[in-house]
Amino acid sequence: KAPTPVKDIYTPFWNYATSVLNARLPDLKAYPIPDGFEHKEAMVGKGKRAGLVTTDSYAYCTPKLRQIRTAHVQGGTQLQVLNFVMFPGMQYDLPFFGADLVTLPGGHLIALDMQPLFHTDDYRAKYSKPLEETFKSHQLNLPWGGDFPEEAARFFSPNFLWSRPSEDEVVETHVFGAFKDYLNKYLDFVEQAEPVTDTESLAKIKESQIAYLKYRAEKDPARGMFLRFYGEEWTEEYIHGFLFDLERKIETGEYEPPS
Ligand code: DBV
Protein backbone atom coordinates (compact mmCIF):
# COMPACT_ATOMS: atom_id res chain seq x y z
CA LYS A 1 0.00 0.00 0.00
CA ALA A 2 1.32 3.41 -0.92
CA PRO A 3 1.95 5.71 2.00
CA THR A 4 -0.65 8.43 2.55
CA PRO A 5 0.63 11.67 1.09
CA VAL A 6 1.47 14.19 3.76
CA LYS A 7 0.16 17.68 3.51
CA ASP A 8 2.99 20.13 3.01
CA ILE A 9 1.89 22.79 5.42
CA TYR A 10 4.55 25.54 5.18
CA THR A 11 5.41 25.78 1.49
CA PRO A 12 2.54 28.24 0.91
CA PHE A 13 3.96 30.42 3.72
CA TRP A 14 7.40 30.58 2.16
CA ASN A 15 6.00 31.09 -1.34
CA TYR A 16 4.00 34.02 -0.02
CA ALA A 17 7.04 35.43 1.76
CA THR A 18 9.30 35.24 -1.28
CA SER A 19 6.72 36.95 -3.47
CA VAL A 20 6.30 39.77 -0.92
CA LEU A 21 10.06 40.12 -0.39
CA ASN A 22 10.55 40.37 -4.14
CA ALA A 23 7.74 42.86 -4.56
CA ARG A 24 8.59 45.10 -1.62
CA LEU A 25 12.39 44.99 -1.45
CA PRO A 26 13.67 46.34 -4.78
CA ASP A 27 17.31 45.83 -3.75
CA LEU A 28 16.90 42.18 -2.79
CA LYS A 29 20.02 40.12 -3.52
CA ALA A 30 21.07 36.54 -2.93
CA TYR A 31 22.96 35.97 0.34
CA PRO A 32 25.59 33.23 0.15
CA ILE A 33 24.72 29.86 1.65
CA PRO A 34 27.80 27.80 2.58
CA ASP A 35 28.48 24.79 0.35
CA GLY A 36 26.54 21.72 1.36
CA PHE A 37 23.88 23.62 3.30
CA GLU A 38 21.40 24.60 0.58
CA HIS A 39 19.81 21.19 0.65
CA LYS A 40 20.33 18.31 3.06
CA GLU A 41 18.55 15.03 3.39
CA ALA A 42 18.70 11.86 5.46
CA MET A 43 16.63 8.73 6.01
CA VAL A 44 15.35 8.81 9.55
CA GLY A 45 13.49 6.23 11.68
CA LYS A 46 13.00 2.51 11.27
CA GLY A 47 10.48 0.18 9.60
CA LYS A 48 7.08 1.72 8.86
CA ARG A 49 8.15 5.02 10.38
CA ALA A 50 11.24 5.37 8.21
CA GLY A 51 11.18 8.43 6.00
CA LEU A 52 13.21 11.08 4.32
CA VAL A 53 13.83 14.34 6.18
CA THR A 54 14.92 17.23 3.97
CA THR A 55 16.15 20.66 5.02
CA ASP A 56 16.18 23.44 2.44
CA SER A 57 17.82 26.79 3.07
CA TYR A 58 17.12 30.13 1.44
CA ALA A 59 18.87 33.44 2.00
CA TYR A 60 18.76 37.03 0.79
CA CYS A 61 19.96 40.45 1.85
CA THR A 62 19.28 44.11 1.15
CA PRO A 63 21.16 47.28 2.09
CA LYS A 64 19.03 47.47 5.29
CA LEU A 65 18.69 43.75 6.07
CA ARG A 66 22.00 42.03 6.69
CA GLN A 67 20.50 38.57 6.34
CA ILE A 68 17.06 37.25 5.48
CA ARG A 69 17.09 33.51 5.88
CA THR A 70 14.87 30.49 6.08
CA ALA A 71 15.22 26.85 6.99
CA HIS A 72 12.41 24.64 5.73
CA VAL A 73 12.41 21.15 7.21
CA GLN A 74 10.14 18.51 5.76
CA GLY A 75 9.88 15.18 7.50
CA GLY A 76 6.36 14.08 6.69
CA THR A 77 3.95 13.40 9.54
CA GLN A 78 6.81 13.41 12.04
CA LEU A 79 7.97 16.93 11.49
CA GLN A 80 7.63 20.08 9.45
CA VAL A 81 9.32 23.39 10.24
CA LEU A 82 9.57 26.83 8.73
CA ASN A 83 12.09 28.94 10.62
CA PHE A 84 12.33 32.37 9.01
CA VAL A 85 14.35 35.23 10.52
CA MET A 86 15.39 38.64 9.23
CA PHE A 87 18.48 40.23 10.78
CA PRO A 88 18.78 43.98 10.18
CA GLY A 89 22.08 45.70 9.53
CA MET A 90 23.57 47.20 12.68
CA GLN A 91 23.19 50.77 11.50
CA TYR A 92 19.42 50.38 12.09
CA ASP A 93 17.56 50.01 15.37
CA LEU A 94 15.05 47.67 13.70
CA PRO A 95 13.82 44.61 15.62
CA PHE A 96 14.39 41.12 14.25
CA PHE A 97 11.57 39.46 12.35
CA GLY A 98 11.20 35.96 13.74
CA ALA A 99 8.88 33.14 12.72
CA ASP A 100 9.29 29.67 14.18
CA LEU A 101 6.50 27.49 12.78
CA VAL A 102 6.78 23.89 13.90
CA THR A 103 4.55 20.86 13.28
CA LEU A 104 5.16 17.77 15.41
CA PRO A 105 3.11 14.57 15.64
CA GLY A 106 1.23 16.01 18.65
CA GLY A 107 0.31 19.35 17.08
CA HIS A 108 1.67 22.71 16.03
CA LEU A 109 3.93 25.15 17.80
CA ILE A 110 3.76 28.70 16.52
CA ALA A 111 6.09 31.57 17.44
CA LEU A 112 5.77 34.85 15.58
CA ASP A 113 7.27 38.17 16.67
CA MET A 114 9.30 41.25 15.93
CA GLN A 115 11.98 40.73 18.52
CA PRO A 116 13.14 43.98 20.13
CA LEU A 117 16.67 45.28 20.61
CA PHE A 118 15.65 47.34 23.64
CA HIS A 119 12.99 47.31 26.33
CA THR A 120 12.49 51.06 26.69
CA ASP A 121 9.31 53.13 26.42
CA ASP A 122 10.66 54.88 23.33
CA TYR A 123 11.47 51.61 21.62
CA ARG A 124 8.07 50.13 22.43
CA ALA A 125 6.34 53.26 21.15
CA LYS A 126 8.28 53.03 17.91
CA TYR A 127 8.14 49.31 17.17
CA SER A 128 5.49 47.64 19.36
CA LYS A 129 2.62 50.12 19.56
CA PRO A 130 2.03 50.17 15.77
CA LEU A 131 1.58 46.38 15.84
CA GLU A 132 -0.62 46.21 18.93
CA GLU A 133 -3.99 46.09 17.17
CA THR A 134 -2.78 43.45 14.72
CA PHE A 135 -1.46 41.37 17.60
CA LYS A 136 -4.72 41.62 19.54
CA SER A 137 -6.84 40.62 16.58
CA HIS A 138 -4.74 37.51 15.93
CA GLN A 139 -4.41 36.57 19.57
CA LEU A 140 -8.17 35.99 19.67
CA ASN A 141 -7.64 33.01 17.36
CA LEU A 142 -4.16 32.08 18.56
CA PRO A 143 -4.23 32.00 22.37
CA TRP A 144 -1.06 31.98 24.49
CA GLY A 145 0.66 28.60 24.20
CA GLY A 146 1.87 28.43 27.81
CA ASP A 147 5.00 26.71 29.03
CA PHE A 148 7.70 28.95 27.70
CA PRO A 149 11.44 29.11 28.56
CA GLU A 150 11.75 31.99 31.04
CA GLU A 151 15.25 33.01 29.94
CA ALA A 152 13.88 33.63 26.42
CA ALA A 153 11.32 36.18 27.65
CA ARG A 154 13.75 39.09 27.34
CA PHE A 155 14.03 38.53 23.60
CA PHE A 156 10.33 38.86 22.88
CA SER A 157 8.09 41.87 22.36
CA PRO A 158 4.65 42.55 23.83
CA ASN A 159 3.27 41.36 20.47
CA PHE A 160 4.70 37.87 20.72
CA LEU A 161 2.24 35.39 19.22
CA TRP A 162 2.95 32.05 20.88
CA SER A 163 0.37 29.35 20.36
CA ARG A 164 -0.01 25.60 20.14
CA PRO A 165 -2.97 24.90 17.87
CA SER A 166 -3.85 21.26 17.28
CA GLU A 167 -5.76 21.62 13.99
CA ASP A 168 -3.98 21.97 10.62
CA GLU A 169 -6.81 24.25 9.59
CA VAL A 170 -5.88 26.82 12.24
CA VAL A 171 -2.38 26.97 10.78
CA GLU A 172 -3.68 27.29 7.22
CA THR A 173 -6.08 30.12 8.11
CA HIS A 174 -5.27 32.05 11.30
CA VAL A 175 -1.54 31.44 11.47
CA PHE A 176 -1.16 32.21 7.77
CA GLY A 177 -3.13 35.45 8.26
CA ALA A 178 -0.95 36.51 11.20
CA PHE A 179 2.20 35.61 9.28
CA LYS A 180 1.16 37.81 6.35
CA ASP A 181 0.31 40.75 8.60
CA TYR A 182 3.52 40.54 10.66
CA LEU A 183 5.64 40.24 7.53
CA ASN A 184 4.04 43.24 5.86
CA LYS A 185 4.17 45.38 9.01
CA TYR A 186 7.81 44.48 9.39
CA LEU A 187 8.55 45.56 5.84
CA ASP A 188 6.77 48.87 6.61
CA PHE A 189 9.28 49.40 9.43
CA VAL A 190 12.15 48.47 7.14
CA GLU A 191 10.98 50.99 4.52
CA GLN A 192 10.80 53.73 7.14
CA ALA A 193 14.09 52.92 8.88
CA GLU A 194 16.76 55.62 8.89
CA PRO A 195 20.40 54.89 9.70
CA VAL A 196 21.55 55.57 13.24
CA THR A 197 24.67 57.71 13.35
CA ASP A 198 25.67 58.42 16.94
CA THR A 199 28.40 56.20 18.27
CA GLU A 200 26.76 55.44 21.58
CA SER A 201 23.55 54.15 19.98
CA LEU A 202 25.50 52.12 17.45
CA ALA A 203 27.44 50.45 20.27
CA LYS A 204 24.18 49.55 22.03
CA ILE A 205 22.68 48.10 18.87
CA LYS A 206 25.77 45.98 18.34
CA GLU A 207 25.73 44.71 21.90
CA SER A 208 22.04 43.82 21.74
CA GLN A 209 22.27 42.11 18.36
CA ILE A 210 25.20 39.99 19.48
CA ALA A 211 23.43 38.97 22.70
CA TYR A 212 20.39 37.88 20.70
CA LEU A 213 22.40 35.94 18.13
CA LYS A 214 24.47 34.24 20.83
CA TYR A 215 21.33 33.16 22.64
CA ARG A 216 19.65 31.83 19.52
CA ALA A 217 22.75 29.89 18.46
CA GLU A 218 23.35 28.41 21.91
CA LYS A 219 19.73 27.58 22.70
CA ASP A 220 18.49 26.64 19.26
CA PRO A 221 15.55 24.33 20.03
CA ALA A 222 16.21 22.51 16.76
CA ARG A 223 19.74 21.44 17.70
CA GLY A 224 18.64 18.02 19.08
CA MET A 225 16.61 17.31 15.99
CA PHE A 226 19.40 18.28 13.58
CA LEU A 227 21.94 16.24 15.56
CA ARG A 228 19.76 13.14 15.23
CA PHE A 229 19.16 13.63 11.53
CA TYR A 230 22.43 14.94 10.18
CA GLY A 231 25.14 14.52 12.84
CA GLU A 232 27.19 16.92 14.91
CA GLU A 233 29.56 18.39 12.36
CA TRP A 234 26.84 19.40 9.93
CA THR A 235 24.58 20.70 12.72
CA GLU A 236 27.11 22.98 14.44
CA GLU A 237 28.29 24.37 11.13
CA TYR A 238 24.69 24.95 10.02
CA ILE A 239 23.87 26.83 13.23
CA HIS A 240 27.01 28.98 13.48
CA GLY A 241 27.82 29.27 9.78
CA PHE A 242 24.31 29.90 8.47
CA LEU A 243 21.30 30.10 10.82
CA PHE A 244 22.88 32.48 13.34
CA ASP A 245 26.03 33.58 11.55
CA LEU A 246 26.63 37.12 12.83
CA GLU A 247 29.57 36.39 15.12
CA ARG A 248 31.24 34.28 12.45
CA LYS A 249 30.79 37.03 9.86
CA ILE A 250 32.31 39.62 12.21
CA GLU A 251 35.26 37.31 13.01
CA THR A 252 36.03 36.73 9.34
CA GLY A 253 35.56 40.40 8.45
CA GLU A 254 32.72 39.59 6.04
CA TYR A 255 30.50 41.84 8.14
CA GLU A 256 31.84 45.02 9.61
CA PRO A 257 29.68 46.63 12.30
CA PRO A 258 29.32 50.39 11.84
CA SER A 259 30.94 52.46 14.60
N1 DBV B 1 13.85 26.78 15.97
C1 DBV B 1 14.87 27.58 15.57
C2 DBV B 1 15.38 27.05 14.35
C3 DBV B 1 14.65 25.91 14.03
C4 DBV B 1 13.68 25.74 15.07
C5 DBV B 1 16.52 27.68 13.61
C6 DBV B 1 15.43 25.29 11.80
O1 DBV B 1 15.24 28.60 16.16
C7 DBV B 1 12.74 24.70 15.17
C8 DBV B 1 14.76 25.01 12.89
N2 DBV B 1 11.62 25.16 17.35
C9 DBV B 1 12.07 24.32 16.36
C10 DBV B 1 11.74 22.98 16.72
C11 DBV B 1 11.10 23.04 17.95
C12 DBV B 1 11.04 24.41 18.32
C13 DBV B 1 10.49 24.86 19.55
C14 DBV B 1 12.04 21.76 15.90
C15 DBV B 1 10.55 21.89 18.74
C16 DBV B 1 11.61 21.36 19.66
C17 DBV B 1 11.11 20.14 20.38
O2 DBV B 1 9.95 20.12 20.82
O3 DBV B 1 11.91 19.22 20.50
C18 DBV B 1 10.73 29.75 19.91
N3 DBV B 1 10.69 27.32 19.39
C19 DBV B 1 10.44 26.16 20.06
C20 DBV B 1 10.11 26.48 21.40
C21 DBV B 1 10.21 27.84 21.53
C22 DBV B 1 10.56 28.34 20.24
C23 DBV B 1 9.98 28.68 22.75
C24 DBV B 1 9.73 25.48 22.46
C25 DBV B 1 10.95 24.78 22.93
C26 DBV B 1 11.18 24.96 24.37
O4 DBV B 1 10.20 24.95 25.13
O5 DBV B 1 12.37 25.10 24.74
N4 DBV B 1 11.99 30.97 18.52
C27 DBV B 1 12.14 30.08 19.59
C28 DBV B 1 12.90 30.90 20.57
C29 DBV B 1 13.17 32.14 20.01
C30 DBV B 1 12.56 32.13 18.75
C31 DBV B 1 13.29 30.41 21.91
C32 DBV B 1 13.91 33.34 20.45
C33 DBV B 1 14.59 33.58 21.52
O6 DBV B 1 12.54 33.07 17.97
Image (cartoon, rainbow, N blue to C red):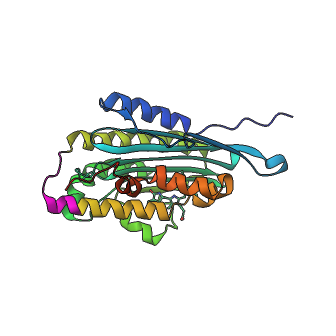
Quarter of the view holding residue 11: top right
Residue at 18%, 47% (x, y): give it: 195
Residue at the farthest front position: 252
Magenta stretch? 194-203
Q: Position of residue 177 (x, y in %)?
A: 44, 40
Quarter of the view holding residue 73: top right
Residue at 31%, 31% (x, y): give it: 24
Q: How many marks?
A: 0
Q: Magenta includes 46?
A: no
Position of the N terminus by quadrant: top right
Asked if one can make out residue 76 in the rendered structure from this viewpoint, the answer is: no
Residue at 79%, 37% (x, y): give it: 3
Q: Nearer the viewer, residue 34 or 75?
A: 34
Residue at the farthest left position: 198
Residue at 27%, 39% (x, y): give it: 63
Q: Magenta includes 199?
A: yes
Q: Position of residue 216 (x, y in %)?
A: 45, 60
Above or below, comparing residue 108 to residue 151 in the picture? above
Whether residue 192 sits left or right of residue 86 in the image: it is left
Asked if one can make out residue 247 in the rendered structure from this viewpoint, the answer is: yes
Q: Nearer the viewer, residue 132 or 69?
A: 69
Q: Position of residue 123 (x, y in %)?
A: 22, 59
Residue at the farthest bottom position: 150
Position of the C terminus by quadrant: bottom left
Q: Nearer the viewer, residue 249 or 69?
A: 249
